[in-house]
Amino acid sequence: DAPAGQGTGQIWAGSADDVASGTQADLTLPAGELSDGWKVRWRVRAVNAATTIGSPWSHWQPLTVDLPDPVSEPAVGPLQVSPSQQVDGATVTSSLTPSLLTQVSDPVGGVLRAEAELEHDPAGQGTGQIWTGSVDNVAVGGQADLTVPADTLADGWKVRWRARAVSATAASAWSDWQSFTVSLPKPTATGLTITPSKVVDGLTVTTTLTPTLQATLTHPTGHALRAEAEIEHDPAAPAGQGSGQIWTGSADNVSSGTQTSIAVPAGTLTGGWKVRWRLRAVSDQAASSWSDWQQVTVGVTQPGEEPLAQTVGPVFLSDQSFTTAAWLRWSNKDGDYIVLEQKGTHQVPFRLGNTADHGLVFTFTSADATSATVEGVLSGVEPPVDEWFHLAGVYDAASRTVTLYLNGAQAGTTQLSFSAWNAQAPLQIGAAMAGSIDEVQIYQRPFSAAEVASVIASATASAPVAAAAPQKTASTQAAAGTGDFDYNRINLQTCQVSGSETGHGEYDARIRELPYNSCWSSYLQVNDYVEDESTGRLVKAGCGSLLKNPVLKWACKQVAEPFDEDLALRFRATVVIHSYLGNATGTGVVDGAGTGIKPTDMKMFIQLDDFALIGEGGRVVKPGNQLSAMPITTRLYIPDPPFTDEGCTTGDGEKKKDISAWQSSSYDVFNIRTTIDNPGVVTCAFHPEVVLYADSGSEWLRLPLFSQKVIDVKGEWVGVAREGKDVPMGWKRWMPHFRCDSLAFGANDPQVEDRVGGCINTRSKRVFVMSTKSGTEFPEVAQHIKDALNPSTNKSTNPPKREGDPEVPNPPSRDVLGTEQPKRIPGNWAAPIGSDAGEPLHRTTSDERNQQNRLVFSRRAFISDLGKPTQKEWPDNPGSNYCKYYQWEKYIAPGVRWKDLNCDEYPFAATLEGAASAEWDFSIRALNAKQNRDQGNALKRFFAEFRVGDENSFWVMIE
């Protein structure tokens, strides 16, 4: 009598042994054999276990299975907020429209209604209910997703919410209240400055009534920003000046990562006022905190108060022996003048100049403190008026002796009771004086009286150890000085539209690699595959497949009528890494004042966007804004040694959000810190990845977010690492790598701004840029290098390269014989990949190697035109060099002084490819000595700012 469709035949058979005669047997059906509503029949028989003789089967007995209906008891599981993360034990969301998630259950099964309510947290702002919401037809066991609508929450609010499940006949109790805080990604305003300004006794003074307020604005996702500033009377201002706000101003549409300027209008400030100002960055959703107040005094510069010139950085060490001198012309013998000055925070270490009371002076302060004492030479000698005179000051650190000279004659000497101290500030020339100054000279040693006199009498005195550092020009942007350094920041948006790497380097695989940036962006696709029984080949699985991976199972539930779609999850992943360059002390970073960022810190930004379910041919079946219930984690994994060095850590291991939350909050920030022995170097490897999950909540798939191109030890491309395939050897070498150091570049070099610490992208190519254009700093040097790098022109450079020519020290003949060969000279960024010219240069920090390179063609004895009537023996002294042999006409030209020419070489002496290793594959040329010194200083600044250390590679480019 069973209804059609229930089934036919035997369901189960069972037995019970050792049943005593006359007693009742009990046979229980195991679980899973019957179903509610079934109509079945059953019968029994008895069997003698000893004789195996059994009774006939009893008649069939009918039985209907009728279970009582379950009682509806809806319930909700743990509550979640997406996106969110735990900060100091509290839940924080970075979205104004977060998803409130909870799992619903009911023993009856079916579908339920989920309800939620949101109210102000009693510990926060406001009181009472903010919003209620619900979602119907949530399958039992499924997750309810209630999205808080726009214009409901505000940044900074502390709120709490609860949820319950409702069936047709019952409702669960409300869950416990769950609190969370709304904290949107904040823009930042850093590097606050007011221009023009100067520091006087530790206080900032602006020299105009219409100064400009400047700051660098940054948005985490690169959006344009608004800068807002306000000025008010300083509470410490003298009585009668005023109090409260003076002015507010703003600037709109400031690109993220750029410096904005807000000019204070005329009529706002008054000379002598003490004021303070602050600034903040404002986006469409959030604003940064106001910066700290910046105190400034409004002062109008008077003649003689502004330095006549200023170097980029400190020029010499004032705590060591030094000599400083200059030619001066003043019209006022009673002027309070300062000739040269390197300031500390509160004091200047020394003062060379004049006072009305003591005439010419050369004094020192005991410490960089407001209470410091002053000692030194107070000569009582009046300066000459309206005529040029020579003033020199000598400090001998060993004896602490200070001596002042006027026109070569001693004007006074004394011994200090303390040792001088050093100030790492730019050198101000004519720091405070009305008049003329010329021929400023500084030497890092004490001169005798005779040497001071010789400086006046002759222009051939020992060359100074330092001169004013050249300012940055368009031709030397790779060797910029203080304030000119540019990180060339890449943000998430610019990364996504970047082209591929230029190709001038070797085997570049990712989109863009710069010294302080790494950028990778790619579309990823997750498919499922099954084996075709007829061909044995793997084909895409569809929703009709019996076995589906977790993503395909989820995808098929997202589509109303999936049929046999071969669905795939597609999304775009973008990874940007920012690193930093240390400042002069290593306590902060360039352009990072107030941020707390250290030189060996880094930031990684990971963005996931453009989600979609796609079908055949990439057709979008369901866009990302309609997808939900798929948790996705971004993770920064730092491998163990030997793939990375010890000391590389992150406190932000992973960030987990539902796929729906990625639509409103598409990126995460990972902070990286490197611990380094001082001094030391550490290389950090990073493995950013996306993690997908199975239904059980366990990890199912990890997708690396970096190039999967694989090269072997020779640098040859050997394939692509793919999920499910054997990974070729060496694949981890393509993870992002940054080399961090705590070294002091530029230390003890007055021409180079100290840069202590930093992290460099090892995949980047560092290029030193020069120009041959008129008006740039060293066009003669650039033209020489341009000629040396070009194989079509370098065979005409000196020394010529020929078969069978003599070896060093004797130069090849300068005569044109027609057998000259092109030279193999490396370092040309513009040369084709794989060419000799396109190979990099490698810096050497070895003074011995540097000298070996120069000794090939200079500072030694040699014989030119060996065996010819014109044979000449050149003496073993510093003035001998090949340039004088090859270009003698330059040295004897009318009006030319030998000291105005330098014998320049390429490749540079500071490289492993210099003349000592090149046979005749190098070039020399006599050219302007000042240009050659300026180019050398610019190259050293390039090494410091781009962390080009010993044996590190770099290239040159001539514009």
Image: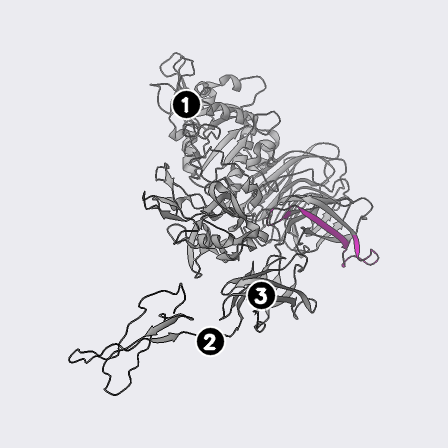
Q: Tag count in the figure?
A: 3
- For marks 3 and 1, give the CA distance: 79 Å
Number of other residues with Cα within 10 Å of mark 1, as a class: few under 14, some 14 to 19, many 20 or more: many
Q: Can you identify the residue that label 1 sits on?
A: 823
Q: Earlier in the sequence, mark 3 or mark 1?
A: 3
Q: Which residue is situated farthest in the top direction here?
A: 869
- How busy is the neighbourhood of tag 2: few (under 14 within 10 Å), some, or many (20 plus)? few
Secondary structure of residue under mark 3: strand
Residue picked out by circle 2? 68
Q: Which numbered mark, 2 or 1, is in the foreground of this view?
A: 2
- Element type at mark 1: loop
- Of pointers 2 and 1, the one earlier in the residue sequence: 2
Query: Which one is in front, 540 or 404?
Result: 540
- Of the two numbered discs 3 and 1 in the rendering, the one whose residue sits closer to the viewer: 3
- Label located before the other in sequence (2 or 3): 2
Q: Which residue is at the front of the view, 400 or 219?
A: 219
Circle 3 is placed at which residue position? 114
Do the residues bearing badges 2 and 1 touch, measured as CB atoms within 8 Å? no
**Residue 164 sits above or below residue 401 on the image:** below
Residue 373 appears in the picture as rendered: yes
Magenta stretch, residue numbers: 217-246
Closer to the camera in the image, 750 or 348: 750
Relative horizontal placement of residue 873, taking residue 107 as reference (left or right): left
Please indicate whether residue 483 sits to the left or right of residue 110 in the image: right
Q: In the rendered image of this protein, does residue 126 appear above or below residue 936? A: below
Mark 3 vs 1: CB contact within 8 A: no
Residue 17 in picture, x, y percent from top left: 23, 80
Find the residue positioned furthest to the right: 240
Binning the other alpha carbons within 10 Å of mark 3 as few (below 14), some (14 to 19) or many (20 upward) gives many
The amino acid on which the numbered mark 3 sits, given as a three-letter code, is Ala
Task: Give residue 301's position: percent from left, percent from top.
Answer: 76, 43
